[in-house]
Amino acid sequence: MSDILLNISGVNKRFGGLQALTDVGIKIMKGQIYGLIGPNGAGKTTFFNVITGLYQPDTGTFELDGKPYSPSAPHAVAKAGIARTFQNIRLFGEMSALENVMVGRHVRTHQGVFGAIFRHGAARREEAAIRARAQELLDFVGIGQFAQRTARFLSYGDQRRLEIARALATEPKLLALDEPAAGMNATEKVALRELLVKIQGAGVTILLIEHDVKLMMGLCDRISVLEYGKLIAEGLPAEIQKNQAVIEAYLGGAH
Ligand SMILES: Nc1ncnc2c1ncn2[C@@H]1O[C@H](COP(=O)(O)OP(=O)(O)OP(=O)(O)O)[C@@H](O)[C@H]1O
């Protein structure tokens, strides 16, 4: 068995006249926290959306855990074992924290959402197991005490944790986080960092885009840097920090 979890190569993506991604690839080993950085407009979100099935690439080869996967639609990608969060939090605001995680869990269960609605026999037993697991996940991300709270009444940092718990409920091989620290204060960022290390410790590989370069340097095992839709560097954080092309990309850009 290979230690490569995600192996993507040759991704091209054009929006009309704009070549947003040119021959982009990434190789993530099992257990890594892998960072994707780059100045504004570099193509990070586009690449992320291609990996998670939200955008269709023009070309590209995609393998997860040694098996080809087709990023043709978000649900297909979720089934293959990739769960994601979004830059703008997307929770079911009127549902409780626990219910939000239970929805994520139904991706992996037999009865699905209909079983949950009709609540007969096996479905009811499965429902109890889903509820228990959802509570465990809330405890794991540190918001177990808010299980019954309506999601939109949670603090911003806790809503981000809830999104992560919901993504983990699908039992992903890869957790893909789109700017998880956006809008967080310094204390929340420290707590987020601790949570990501804990998730890594539980055996989940993580890919993240993040604007806070300092956070990324201290957190990631490896980093790829995009500029104008092309990879300009890949390596250990210490190597990236010293890389001349990266320094110039950031000095010349909006950062
Ligand atoms: N749906 C789309 N239609 C047309 N152009 C798009 C679309 N999505 C992104 N682009 C363009 O592709 C380029 C890359 O954008 P992208 O959002 O991927 O960059 P980014 O690195 O994520 O930037 P940021 O850090 O600002 O979020 C930009 O020039 C952007 O305007």
Image (cartoon, rainbow, N blue to C red):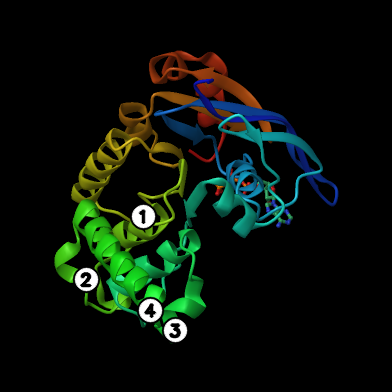
On the image, numbered disc 1 is attached to which residue? 164
Name the image quarter holding residue 154. Answer: bottom left
SS under mark 4: helix
Judge: label 2 CB < 8 Å from ligand 1: no
How far apart are labels 2 and 4 at the CA level? 25 Å
**Disc number for residue 147:** 2
**Disc number for residue 117:** 3
Nearer the observer: mark 4 or 1; the answer is 4
Name the image quarter holding residue 11. Answer: top right
How far apart are labels 4 and 3 at the CA level? 12 Å
Decide which of 153, 5 is in the foreground and name it.
5
Sequence-first disc among 2 and 3: 3
- Classify 46 as above or below 88: above
On the image, numbered disc 4 is attached to which residue? 121
Q: Which residue sits at x=66%, y=28%?
A: 25
Residue 52 % position (x, y) = 60, 49
SS under mark 2: loop
How far apart are labels 4 and 1 at the CA level? 30 Å
